[in-house]
Amino acid sequence: MQGLGFCYAMQPWLQKCYGERQAELRSAQLRQLEFFNTQPYMAPLALGMVSALEEEASGLPAAERDERIARMGRLKGSVAASLAGIGDALFWGALRPFCAALSLALTLLAWRLDFLLALLGLPGLYLAAYSLPAFFVRCRGLGWGYSWGDQIAARLAAFPWQVWIRRLRLAGFLLALAVCGLMLASPLVDSRQRWVGAIMLLGYFLVLFLLAARASPYRLYLATCLLGSLAAAGGWI
Amino acid sequence: MNWPGPVLGAVAVALVELDAAHAGQFQVSRPIVLGPLLGLALGHADLGAGVGILLELMSLSELPVGGHLPLNATVASGAALLLAGAPCPVPVELALPVGLALGWLHQRLEGLRRLRRNGLGRSVEALLRLGREPGLGSLAAAELCRQALTTLGLLAAALAALPLLRWGWSIAPEALKAGLRLSWGLSPWLAAASLLRAAGNPWRVSV
């Protein structure tokens, strides 16, 4: 899936490693065209690792190069899968909900001061909260992968990814609860709407939680529309 | 608000959509970013923020992992805002489901585009084996253009269909309108529940 992009990213480095050796350069380009798929922010780590290994292989005699290249291919595949597991859980599963909850909570607090400013500050808050760690990993990842080389698996295992993912998820969950509380406590909501809101919030959450993959928020939105239409047709609302 | 505004807005959404998966991935394509800014550009900052926040929270649990292609929230939010913010707008309670439909359609079209791109790897491989330069940069640029044009085409079709949507809304049964208004009215609570669900079990580390 990302093989073309990976090969494109490797082009300048491969030309540097193999120079005028066109046949070896073409072989290197062909092997970097192979299937590759990982989380995009973690991809620089794999790029750095492969850059180090290609540089090392380019300096070896032909007899030793083939074995090193085969090892590089196996390492690239397994590292991509590991990086995807870490990156998906960290960025998509933990950081994105955390940043959404954080920016929403701050916006709900700030809107009492200036509504428009709070609404317009929301994108900036979200981007700042998300981009700082994301850019850090993307920018430093290439250097890390290059310096770690084939020791990347050990270096990745040494970092407490699960601890940070759990912390982000806990923080995101607490902030999400805060957002719900701020919504229910909003002066824009009267007491009747507050009760309705609390019941609907709990109901929607239970449906999403219990039905999991079978109940997406989009389907719930359409289901609400359908039930509302039926209720209106029946004269209940 | 004149028509150049929504047309330029459609172009902007088509370009920003590339950030979702094809180029950059700086998260500027997320509805929580696009919504308020597009809403401000169209003269409806509060509507833009409302739609953007709603679609952001609803899309949080739709993760692009393992080759899964989620409903395109960027197109959904952009289309909904363009329809609700155009010179002859439709009500937001209609614009949102239409936006969701366009986001779903974009998901399908992108799936077909990705299937087609699978053949590009074989073409590049054949060129390399013949000793020829594959021109990966030009290939990437061409694919990005095609992706942007696909998005722009969908949004342009939505804007062109505005008179039809307004006519449809005028003849729609009151029960249907009531149902759409109800779902829009309850959407903040659905969004909050989606956020709670996406934040999920704080002790789980997998996706």
Image (tube, coloured by chain):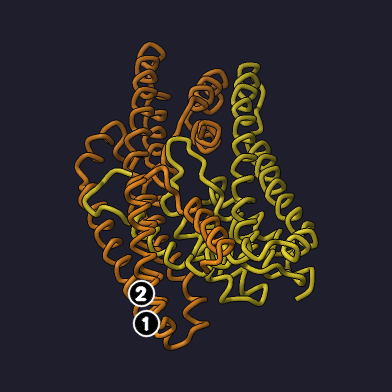
Q: Residue under circle 1?
A: A191
Q: Which image quadrant for residue B74?
A: bottom right
* Identity of the residue drawn at 33% across and 44% down: B207
Residues packed near mark 1 inside 10 Å, few (<14), some (14 to 19) or many (20 plus): few
Kindly identify which chain the residue marked by label 2 belongs to. A
Kindly identify which chain the residue marked by label 1 belongs to. A
Residue A172: horizontal and vertical position, in percent?
30, 61
Which of A130/A104 is in front? A104
- As drawn, is B158 to the left or to the right of B37? right
* Identity of the residue drawn at 64% across and 30% down: B116
> What's the CA distance linking mark 2 and mark 1?
6 Å
Tag shown at residue B57: none
Residue A198: horizontal and vertical position, in percent?
35, 70
Which of A19/B96 is in front? B96
Q: Colour of chain B?
A: yellow
Residue B23: horizontal and vertical position, in percent?
56, 48
- Name the residue furthest bottom: A113
Q: Residue under circle 2?
A: A195
* Identity of the residue drawn at 34% across and 40% down: A145
Which of A220/B100 is in front? A220
Which of B90/B143 is in front? B90
- Above or below A87: residue B85: below
Q: Which image quadrant for residue B161?
A: bottom right
- Above or below A114: residue B204: above
Question: How many numbered circles are shown?
Answer: 2
Residues marked 2 and 1, same chain: yes
The answer, for residue B36, to whether it is visible in the render is yes
* Identity of the residue drawn at 75% across and 66% down: B170
Q: Amino acid at mark 1?
A: Ser
Q: Colour of chain A?
A: orange
In the rendered structure, are the residues bearing label 2 and label 1 in contact, judged by CB atoms less than 8 Å apart?
yes
- As drawn, is B93 to the left or to the right of A218? right
